[in-house]
Amino acid sequence: MTNSTRGIERDITTLQLEEKKLVAEIKRTAKIGNEAITKISTCQLIKLRQQIAKLQACLQQMSPVKQTEEETEKLTNQLSTSPKGRIASKMTEDAKRKRKTFKAPWTMDDALRV
């Protein structure tokens, strides 16, 4: 999960750098008086800002998932380090062993014979 969020954050920063360059280009071409290039650049700027907004929305949707993963990892670490957690894990291991050793009868007749 963290790899994907890092990738999205990296994309956002590169797009923001492109946005700064594009704004500077728009200002430069507007000073010169070249309207055609300025219009094209402003359309590119609008699309670029929309892409940034989409990526930020995607990142916001992923943040609650990341938080829940971190919380569960934290809780499991707490359980494994606490003495009660060790006792509980031993009890679950014992229960698993008992389930493996106990074989249930296949039919009701077999159960009545025992």
Image: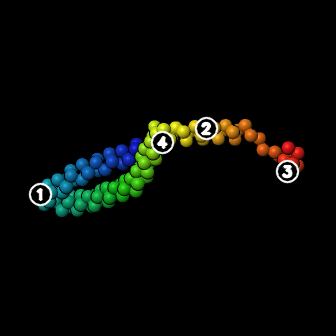
Residue 60, x across and y down, in percent: 37, 56
Image height check: is 70 above or below 48? Answer: above
Horizontal side, residue 61 vs residue 39: left or right: right
Q: Residues within 10 Å of mark 2 (few under 14, many from 20)?
A: few
Q: Is residue 60 visible?
A: yes
Image height check: is 3 above or below 52? Answer: above
- The answer to whether the residues at label 3 and label 4 have Cβ atoms under 8 Å apart is no
Q: Residues within 10 Å of mark 3 (few under 14, many from 20)?
A: few
Point out the tag, 3 or 2, that comes first from the N-terminus: 2
- The answer to whether the residues at label 1 and label 4 have Cβ atoms under 8 Å apart is no
Most foreground residue, 81 or 34? 81
Image height check: is 52 above or below 72? Answer: below
Point out the tag, 3 or 4, that comes first from the N-terminus: 4
Identity, as a three-letter code, of the amino acid under mark 3: Met
Q: Is residue 1 visible?
A: no
Q: Which mark is residue 32?
A: 1
Horizontal side, residue 61 vs residue 27: left or right: right
Point out the tag, 2 or 4, that comes first from the N-terminus: 4
What residue is rendered at 14% in x and 59% in y?
30
Q: Which mark is residue 108?
A: 3
In which quadrant will I find the N terminus? top left
- The answer to whether the residues at label 1 and label 3 have Cβ atoms under 8 Å apart is no
Identity, as a three-letter code, of the amino acid under mark 1: Ile
Point out the tag, 1 or 3, that comes first from the N-terminus: 1
Identity, as a three-letter code, of the amino acid under mark 4: Leu
Point out the tag, 2 or 1, that comes first from the N-terminus: 1
Q: Which residue is mark 4?
A: 79
Looking at the rendered structure, the secondary structure element under dot 4 is helix
Q: Residues within 10 Å of mark 4 (few under 14, many from 20)?
A: some
Q: Which mark is residue 93?
A: 2
What residue is rendered at 33% in x and 48% in y?
9
Horizontal side, residue 88 vs residue 72: left or right: right
